[in-house]
Image (cartoon, rainbow, N blue to C red):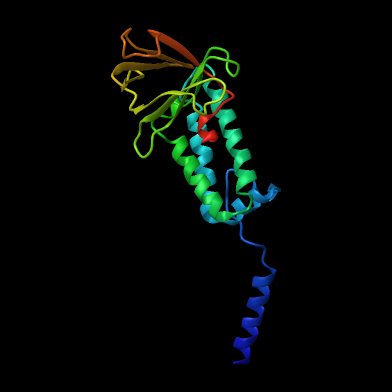
Amino acid sequence: MVRIACWAGVAALIFLAAPEATWSASFDCAKAGAPTEKAICKDAVVSKLDEQVAAAFKAAQGLWPAGNWSTFIRNEQRGWLKDRNAICKADIACLRQDYQRRLTFLTHPSLKWMGRYVAGRCPDDGVYLDVTPGYPDAGIDVELYICPDPKGNMLLQAKGDVDASGRLSFDDAGCPRVLAFTPDVATLSAPKTERCALGTDSRVFRRDPAKSPYLLE
């Protein structure tokens, strides 16, 4: 009994002296300084999610080989990291939820179409398209606003799947519209009919690499 008690005491001392457990992440946990980074390194689930998000982000950068896509997705990722640190801080439950949401976004089948596309001189005037993931399906959600303030200024909403040629066809209150995507550009077209109230046959929108409608939701 004495020997067992002695070993138990030694074991307790070793446990107390051992450093707090850390897990691998996409960054060097030995250099973790911010409360969020330290929290990531201390939780196995969040550490694994951090690695998965880093891998998904790397893959996402190659979805468009040219144009401003890589700038957009890098700015978008930086914006998410800033929000993660400011909102979740060291809250593990918040981090787990935020990482799951981020991973879903970065692996969304329609990710390459996402962004804010502008026609005109926003924010002074003009119009813009916000293209965000369609959940729980694989499609996209589209909202068209008048610049600069979307409150009360929405012109149309649509959702659906973009086909293999980069086109989304949808009905807008009896007006058959087509939204066609190419690198950095979304072109909205419709026939000249009484039901197509926006008035133009075609309007070209260009992706703003500094804006992420997904982060503004």
Which percent across, then down, holds residue 39? 62, 53
- Left or right side of 35 for 130: left
Between residue 214 and residue 8, name the one nearer to us. 214
Q: Residue at x 54, y 35 (%)?
A: 215
Q: Residue at x 50, y 49 (%)?
A: 97
On-image quarter of the N terminus:
bottom right
Between residue 98 and residue 191, name the one nearer to us. 191
On screen, residue 183 above or below 19: above
On screen, residue 103 above or below 62: below
Q: Residue furthest bottom?
A: 1
On screen, residue 106 above or below 182: below
Which percent across, then down, holds residue 124? 60, 16
Q: Residue at x 63, y 91 (%)?
A: 2
Between residue 124 and residue 12, name the one nearer to us. 124
Q: Residue at x 65, y 62 (%)?
A: 20
Residue 90 is at least partly visible in this image: yes
Which percent across, then down, holds residue 190? 34, 12
Labels in figure, total:
0
Question: Within the image, what quadrant is residue 75 found in?
Answer: top right
Residue 27 is at least partly visible in this image: no
Which percent across, then down, holds residue 104? 44, 40
Between residue 189 and residue 152, name the one nearer to us. 152
